[in-house]
Image (spheres, rainbow, N blue to C red):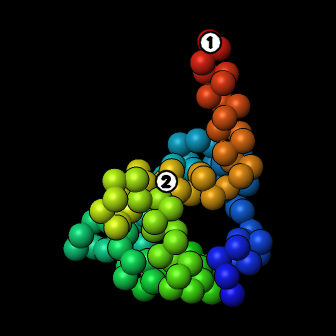
Amino acid sequence: MTSQNQQSHFHDDLPFMANKLGGDGLIDELCNGFNLLKDSDKGVITFESLKKNSALLGLQGLSDEDLQSMLMEGDFDGDGTLNQMEFCVLMFRLSPELMEESKLWLEEALQQ
């Protein structure tokens, strides 16, 4: 199954979580998700830790290629891993509805 095919079957729960938990609660949940996926020795998400722990977040159906693509998509500093900030930004980017809401929040903030 290709990454594009997987994305079409991905159920985006972040907007629901944001509405239910509020901004701070959503960030707390994202931090919890990061902590579940990270390599406990290195303190970042590596390919190995993502592959090992992905089932904890319902991502067990993703191929190695899909997992590697996720890492590359979120890895802004080019070190091959995801730190907590990169992970949170990636989760927002993977949620089109939440990204749209974030743009609206940013526009409102800039207007004030």
Q: CA distance from mark 2 to mark 1?
A: 26 Å
User: Residue placed at 24% from the left, 70% from the top?
Assistant: 42
Q: How many marks?
A: 2
Residue 108 appears in which quarter of the rendering? top right
Say few, some or many: other residues with alpha carbon within 10 Å of mark 2 (under 14 / 14 to 19 / 20 or more).
many
Q: Position of residue 1 (x, y in %)?
A: 69, 87
Q: Height in image: 100 above or below 53?
A: above
Q: Nearer the viewer, residue 50 or 24?
A: 50
User: Residue placed at 55% from the left, 48% from the top?
Assistant: 25
Q: Is residue 6 left or right of residue 81?
A: right
| Of pointers 2 and 1, the one earlier in the residue sequence | 2
User: Residue placed at 67% from the left, 55% from the top?
Assistant: 95
Return the residue found at the far right.
8
Q: Is residue 6 left or right of residue 75?
A: right
Q: Nearer the viewer, residue 103 or 78?
A: 78
User: Residue placed at 63% from the left, 43% from the top?
Assistant: 22
Instruction: Classify mark 1: helix, strand or loop.
Output: loop
Q: Circles 2 and 1: CB distance less than 8 Å?
A: no
Return the residue found at the far top.
112
Disc marking residue 88 = 2
Q: Nearer the viewer, residue 107 or 3?
A: 3
**Is there any visible trace of residue 75 in the rendered image?**
yes
Residue at the spot of label 1? 112
Q: Position of residue 49 (x, y in %)?
A: 38, 79
**Is there any visible trace of residue 84 in the rendered image?**
no
Q: Height in image: 18 above or below 59?
A: above
Return the residue found at the far left.
41
Disc marking residue 34 = none
Instruction: Classify mark 2: helix, strand or loop.
Output: helix
Position of the C terminus by quadrant: top right
Q: Position of residue 12 (x, y in %)?
A: 72, 62
